[in-house]
Amino acid sequence: MKARLEALPGESGKAELGAALVGSGGLARWAHLPNLKKIPHVSLRAVHSASGARGKSYALRFGAAYCATDYEEILRDPEIDLVLITSRNQHHAPQAIGALRAGKHVFVEKPMALTEQECRELCAAVEETGKQLTVGFNRRFAPFYIELKKRLAGRSGPAVLQCRVNSPGISGAYWMADPAIGGVPDIDSAAITLVTATGKIAQISNSRRASYGYDQRIEVHGSNGMVRADNIHESTVEVAGGQGFQRPPLMNFFIERYMPAYYAEVAAFVAAVNEGRPPQPDGASGLQALILAEAAVRSNAGRRTVDVSEI
């Protein structure tokens, strides 16, 4: 198989930044590739995929100049300024480090890496190269969570945060159950309690067997009241009758629910690169998330409270 396949004759249109999309899964197809066509000041230069046929299909569909099965082809291309990494989790850190050292800015999907050491190597590569790195924590760009955070700004005093993150049935063959690629086996439902240095309490409840739909809610309770970001339903129409109230089902596909956030996170990264300022969330945010996850795994294994200073 050829490492590189031309997708379009001649030169493609060139915006301020040339982008390469690495990985050809559903997230690339449904979110990042369509969004790259809409975001100003960036153009899709190349698609990298281990599958030449799928890569060529995406390159043709979304207007890339070419596709490549060889990642080094992407790294050698001087017209590529930034790389969006949406490959399998175990490839995130090595591909991101390679891109940074090749002089590219990097957007890497979560998780940023599988180990603390990989996270620290990525952060070191950012320092070495002076290139920008952001992690795809797209919920931070969801309009309703942004509004919730604004409502909490400036408050003080005790608080209890409850976060529910439930997904419809996920089979044991899915990556979430395979530790080799970032999953955790044998845990379908869990509750994690975190206590901050200032005494605030956060509880995260998670299930990957939520038969009733894609359920994500946040409530924050304080001494003066409560603020909540609720679920999104397929429709706001509600029917009442002799059998009680009936509401439409939950929006059941995470990309559909968070599409505005997927657009906003990449647009924010492009703007940060163009303006020469550090993006958020950065590598330190990715490292913090992994440390908390590792603390939760150790807590479950040892049936004890774990201080993050142990990690």
Image (cartoon, helix red, strand yellow):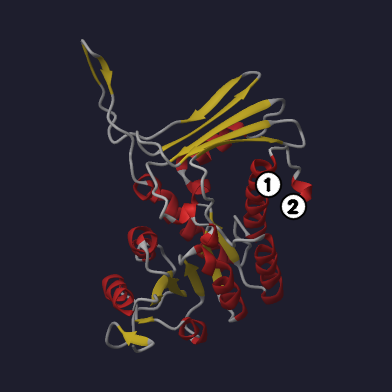
The image shows residue 201 at horizontal and vertical percentages of 67, 31
Residue at 62% x, 48% y is: 293
Q: Is residue 93 above or below residue 160?
A: below
Which residue is at the front of the view, 292 or 188? Answer: 188
Q: How many marks?
A: 2
Which residue is at the front of the view, 71 or 296? Answer: 296
User: Which disc, if any, is residue 311?
Assistant: 2
* Helix, strand or loop for disc 1: helix
User: Which disc, if any, is residue 220?
Assistant: none
Quadrant in which the N terminus is drawn: bottom left
Residue at 63% x, 62% y is: 278
Kindly report the distance in space between the C-alpha atoms of the residues bearing marks 1 and 2.
9 Å
Instruction: Left or right? Give the position of 131 relative to 57.
Output: right
Q: Which residue is mark 1?
A: 298
Q: Are marks 1 and 2 in contact (CB under 8 Å)?
A: yes
Residue type indicated by callout 2: Ile
The image shows residue 9 at horizontal and vertical percentages of 27, 87
Which residue is at the front of the view, 195 or 226? Answer: 195
Mark 1 Cα within 10 Å, few/some/many (few <14, many 20+)?
some
Which residue is at the front of the view, 15 or 103? Answer: 103
Q: Is residue 76 above or below residue 245?
A: below
